[in-house]
Image: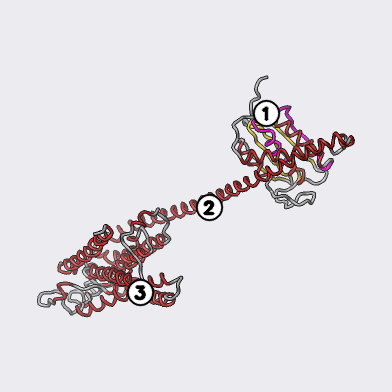
């Protein structure tokens, strides 16, 4: 015999046969004991010879009548869903699951109804001692063969019939399929609680209700599987080997189960109030427990909800960060490829210009010669930066004078647009040594100063201040303008907007940072760079 077949036989014996036999035996023992009748006494009012909760709005209108019509509506919806989706290829699997659930509900209620009729079931409120005239089932002189066995409760069975959800979970290959039993068991117990408080059922009915519901669910699951309408398997080594994944139905199962528990909790509050006359202090004790559980429940629920929201936000932030990193990696690879293609022609241009300087005398003294050299140097720095960002650093530390780099950048920008804006120092140290490659530092400063110049109106002033603060060199660049301005002040089209992000990345890699602030029509950009100790000469 194969291991899978042995496992299946074990499941049928331990999960089906044993529970059915145990519940049946329990039903018989309870029915033959005094507990079956005694459990109804607290809900009976001897003065009025009635069960006061029989006509209670909650137990009769909500749990009994409302519960009955809710089950009928769900059954009808399942039948309609099965009929409309049966021949639709995309919906056929769910349609067959709907048909299975509807069949379980109809067959379970049909069996319990027939059983009740055959057993000539007597309602407790019709018996002697509870306001009626009929003898209690099994009373001396009134025994029948059915009294030795007992009978199920039809209303509770309509709730317990939802244990058939177990096989729906099995057909979906879920790991936590036993959790799919919870809604049916809790709804059945809730209906049983209502009928018990109303004096309509005694406790011995409920185990038989579970027996009928579970037996029907198992039998129809086998039939539907044989017909190829419901694929499920209790022994699935492949599923056990798969890594655990999120099961979308779990929140619904937990939510519905907790909702049924909440309704049962409310019902318990009502009938403990009814039993207060027989058990003084019972209702007050329950109210204290109700207060504690409600407060704790709301607190835990709010905490879990807040934790879930924070977790979702953190997960989304991580996803966005990973997406950003992925884009930067792609951009880095593309930029490195472009830089490689630019470097070779750039060297060729340099060689051609050098040759032309020797052959054309006027070229050496041309007014744009300095600007041409500055532009070539800027391109070279950008290419070098791309290579540095695309490959790991060598680990060598290079010291650069930040103050000198700012002065050089100011001179270069003044050549590009002479007289458009003025750069003025408010505090300028002689030297400001930082640990950074000169090319990377110049890229950052060029970007920040160029942004400040382009955002300023013609004739504006860009104020510079460089000083030490908490172990960092801090460069402050202040210019007229706004951070929300969509275009440069001179009307030129804006670029790709990569200057500041790349500068931030470079500064961050060095242990520094870049901050932007706006106040009173002035934009202040602050560059922080860790101070380095200049080696002794």
Q: Position of residue 126 (x, y in %)?
A: 21, 78
Q: Is residue 226 above or below residue 484?
A: below
Whole-percent x, y for residue 530 in the image: 63, 32
Residue 29 image-quadrant placement: bottom left
**Can residue 322 be seen by looking at this rendering?**
yes
Sequence-wise, the earlier of marks 1 and 3 is: 3
- Left-right relation of 304 to 127: right
Name the colour scheme.
secondary structure
- Residue 512: name its quadrant: top right
Q: Quadrant of residue 463?
A: top right
**Closer to us: 227 or 526:** 227
Q: Position of residue 460 (x, y in %)?
A: 80, 43
Real-space Cα separation, disc 2 to disc 3, in angstroms: 40 Å
Q: Nearer the viewer, residue 342 or 44?
A: 342
Q: Residue furthest right?
A: 362
Label 2: few (<14), some or many (≥20) within 10 Å? few
Residue 248 in the image: above or below residue 215? above
Asked if the magenta segment contains residue 273, the reply would be no
Mark 3, residue position: 102
Q: Which residue is mark 1?
A: 433
Marker disc for residue 158: none
Magenta highlight range: 419-446
Q: Which residue is located at x 72 percent, y 31 percent? A: 403
Going from the N terminus, do you reach mark 2 or mark 1 first? 2
Looking at the picture, tell me which residue is in the foreground, 372 or 296.
Answer: 372
Tell me how far mark 2 sits from mark 1, CA to CA: 40 Å
Q: Is residue 44 left or right of residue 66?
A: left
User: Does residue 414 show up?
Assistant: no
For image coordinates 70% across by 45% down, the residue present is 519
Residue 316, which numbered label?
Answer: 2
Dot 2 and dot 3 residues touching (CB under 8 Å):
no
The front one of 427 and 355 is 355
């Amino acid at each position: 015999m194969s291991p899978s077949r042995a496992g299946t036989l074990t499941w049928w014996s331990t999960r089906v046969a044993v529970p059915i036999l145990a519940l049946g035996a329990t039903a018989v023992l309870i029915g033959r004991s005094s507990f079956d009748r005694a459990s109804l006494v607290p809900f009976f009012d001897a003065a009025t010879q009635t069960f006061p909760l029989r006509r209670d709005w909650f137990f009769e209108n909500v749990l009994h009548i409302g519960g009955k019509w809710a089950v009928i509506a769900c059954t009808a919806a399942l039948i309609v869903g099965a009929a409309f989706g049966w021949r639709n290829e995309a919906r056929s699997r769910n349609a067959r699951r709907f048909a299975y659930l509807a069949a379980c509900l109809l067959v379970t209620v049909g069996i319990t109804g027939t059983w009740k009729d055959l057993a000539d079931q007597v309602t407790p409120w019709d018996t002697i001692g509870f306001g009626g005239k009929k003898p209690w089932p099994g009373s001396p002189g009134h025994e029948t063969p059915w009294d030795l066995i007992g009978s199920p409760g039809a209303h509770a069975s309509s709730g317990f019939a939802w244990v058939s959800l177990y096989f729906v979970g099995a057909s979906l290959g879920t790991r936590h399929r036993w959790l799919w039993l919870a809604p049916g068991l809790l709804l059945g117990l809730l209906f049983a609680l209502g009928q018990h408080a109303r004096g309509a059922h005694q406790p011995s009915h409920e185990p038989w209700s579970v027996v009928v519901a579970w037996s029907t669910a198992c039998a129809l699951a086998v039939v539907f599987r044989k017909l190829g309408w419901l694929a499920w398997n209790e022994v699935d080594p492949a599923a056990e080997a798969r890594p655990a994944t999120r099961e979308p139905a779990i929140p619904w199962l937990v939510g519905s189960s907790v909702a049924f528990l909440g309704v049962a909790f409310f019902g318990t509050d009502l009938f403990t109030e009814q039993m207060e006359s027989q058990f003084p202090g019972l209702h007050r004790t329950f109210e204290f427990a109700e207060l504690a559980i409600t407060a704790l429940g709301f607190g835990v629920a709010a905490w879990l909800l807040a934790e879930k929201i924070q977790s979702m936000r953190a997960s989304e932030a991580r996803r966005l960060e990973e997406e950003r990193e992925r884009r930067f990696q792609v951009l880095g690879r593309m930029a490195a490829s472009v830089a490689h293609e630019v470097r070779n022609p750039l060297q060729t241009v340099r060689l051609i210009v050098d040759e032309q300087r020797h052959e054309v005398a006027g070229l050496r003294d041309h007014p744009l010669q300095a600007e041409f050299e500055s532009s070539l140097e800027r391109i070279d720095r950008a290419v070098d930066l791309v290579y540095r960002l695309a490959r790991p650093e060598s680990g060598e530390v290079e010291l650069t004078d930040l103050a000198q780099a700012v002065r050089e950048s100011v001179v270069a920008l003044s050549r590009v647009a002479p007289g458009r804006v003025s750069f003025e120092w408010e505090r300028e140290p002689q030297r400001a040594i930082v640990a950074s490659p000169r090319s990377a530092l110049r890229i950052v400063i060029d970007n920040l100063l160029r942004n400040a110049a382009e955002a300023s109106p013609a004739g504006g002033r860009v104020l510079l201040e460089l000083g030490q603060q908490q172990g960092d060199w801090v460069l402050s660049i202040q210019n007229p303008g706004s951070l929300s301005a969509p275009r440069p002040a001179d009307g030129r089209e804006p670029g790709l907007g990569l200057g500041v992000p790349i500068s931030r990345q470079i500064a961050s890699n060095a242990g520094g940072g870049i901050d932007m602030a706006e106040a009173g029509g002035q934009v202040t950009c602050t560059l922080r760079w860790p101070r380095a100790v200049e080696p002794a000469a």
